[in-house]
Amino acid sequence: MHRVANLPGGSTQLFVGLHLIHEVTSPQAFAALKDKGLQVKCPEQTVATVDHIVPTINQKRPFPDPLAEEMISTLEKNCKTYGIKMHGIGSGNQGIVHVIAPELGLTQPGMTVACGDSHTSTHGAFGAIAFGIGTSQVRDVLASQSLAINKLKVRRIWLDGQLNAGVYAKDLILHVIRTLGVKGGVGYAYEFAGPGATSLSMEERMTICNMAIEGGARCGYFNPDEVTFEYLEGRIHSPYGEAWNRAVNWWESLRSDPKAHFDDEVRFDMSKINPTITWGITPGQGISIDEPLPSPSLLQCSDRLIAEEAYLYMGLKPGTKIAGVPIDVCFIGSCTNGRISDLQAAAEIAKNRQVAKGVKAFVVPGSEHVAQAAKDQGLDILFRKAGFEWREPGCSMCLAMNADRLEGDQISASSSNRNFKGRQGSAKGRTLLMSPAMVAAAAVTGKVTDVRTLLKTNS
Amino acid sequence: MVLQNSNFPIGVVNQVIGRSFALKGDDIDTDRIIPARFLKCVSFESLGKSVFADDRIQLNGLHPFDLPQNQGSKILIVNENFGCGSSREHAPQALMRWGIRAIIGQSFAEIFYGNCLALGIPCATSSISTIQEIQESVTMKYEQIYNLDLQKESLISPAGNWRIKLEQGPREMLLNGSWDVTSQLISKNKELQNAKLNIPYLNNFNIDAKPKERSY
Ligand code: SF4
């Protein structure tokens, strides 16, 4: 239905229903547009915000970092020139692009979504087809509101069972990536289905789709259902009144046929998954909290080299356990886990406890809406009391383009999505990915800790 | 050094001729190709000198991108899953602005591959044993000129010839100069307008709430 034309080379030209832009991958695209004398084709289908470079302590303009200031004012100028709606700082709607589009009701089932950021797959939680694109494609979408896309195979990831207490969507997706590998999804879209999938909330689904691309998949999605509709009803951009009923009717028709053929299928039992955390330098190097770290010699040849490299970089030893590894910095936030339910889960652990001595811990809400909701529930005060810093919304130490970064070979417990070498701002910095509750557990104990032990003493 | 725009690929790309060197390792991600702090720019111009910045600092002059014999080389030989990680076009841009015009490896991450194609940079593949042979050859005989011939799907040199593969679609696009998709996409305006008419959420879901409730 979104097909515009077939292109030479065998790809398809797809209409893009929602194009999200931000300050980092758009300036060069706008510059190219200007160079070629092109216009923005559908400004009304384009929405902008700032997230990657914004400081999270003091957001007063101009920013202390002149490069950051230049990037944000370039975006402001471009939005003004081309008539694009921008949700800037202080608008009440600003935040990480993958957090704000769902909460404003911009992302809807059946849409094609594109954004110059690889974690655009997040929007698949709504049954949208969402692609992360490069800057040259951002230029293409601006100029033509369409994209050249190759046909994808579909792998159904069938989920049975329920997550146990202390195990979260983050653990599930880290487990899936660990099992299928960081290249396992190349050429595929991941469809998450089955009784386990329908039991997940929208925010859990977003966490899972967000990281589908870390498993190599081009995108990930859930079929739209009651949970989806309930989430969307009443949001700023959701259809309303009679239009709402028309929309729901259409959305219901979008579900995969139960008899549909899939190119591949894998099954997971969610009840068998334990808190999972990465120990290495790819999101696929995950381990459950009570397992010993793998010995490279026992791994498949293709995983061995990268495992050896990871041990060298991380300073960890095969055969030891990840639990107990001391932590320097704790980061709760990002488009993977910076939503209100993530902050709530972390707060449950932080409550009536104190951040361990010597640990720097901070919470960065995913958006101004999330920050407001957290304040309404008193979570900001709860975190502060526990010794966490409470920050303004943005991407922050997920990729450390602002002042939030690791120093030297500091090791972080992070609720974000990437543990690549140097990802968090220091060339030697080390990142352990885990659920927000696990990050909070690490913060209050000063080391990697099974969050379930703390949940037990809670009750 | 300021590279001229005209040095960048335009039109038909049927061969890439130049010296070549190896960058070994699987899963070399985009954060390593261009660390995130260099993303803070509003143009791509100065990215070339920052390619692999952190790896290069650590190797203190011994990184392949720093070795004197590799300066001016055009063809990079890599291993598996090259360019994994983020969608940042800064990665291929940094490689291109350093001087790379073609990459040959065991496999490439998908978004990186597409970003390279959009710049007119072919990413060719071959088996692990062939890649290792090529890497050995380019390291031993770094002064040789290699010709990546897209038509023949071969890497040709006085040091030896190797079969390499290009995906059919991208290969055609490079060979007939249609890899610059922007102009192709724009040319389909009529089709685009027609497609829009059939997309329910653009036509059927009009919001009829009071403006106040809908305002930001
Ligand atoms: S939070 Fe991290 S992964 Fe998400 S959009 Fe920001 S930088 Fe990208």
Image (cartoon, coloured by chain):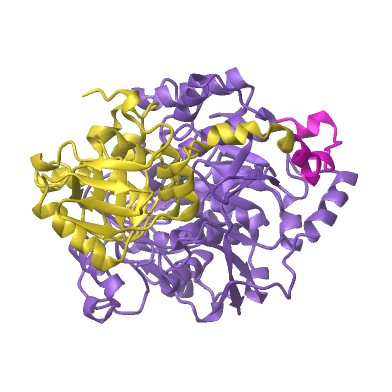
Q: Which chain is yellow?
A: B
- The quadrant holding residue B14 is top left
User: In the image, residue A265 lies at what x, y percent?
Assistant: 57, 76
Q: Colour of chain A?
A: purple
Decide if residue A237 is on the left or right side of residue B65.
right
**Depth check: A392 or A8 in front?**
A8
Q: Residue furthest right?
A: A242
Q: Quadrant of residue A344?
A: bottom right
- In percent of the image, x 41 and y 23: which residue is there? A69
Instruction: Report if residue A161 lies within the magenta region.
Output: no
Compared to residue B139, the image places residue B36 above or below, namely: above
For the residue pair A296 and A446, the one nearer the viewer reads as A296
- Is residue A408 at all visible to an observer of this figure? no
| Of residues B16 and A62, the one drawn nearer to the viewer in this rendering | B16
Is residue B207 in the magenta section? yes
Residue B13, image x, y percentages: 39, 39
- Report the span colored magenta: B193-216
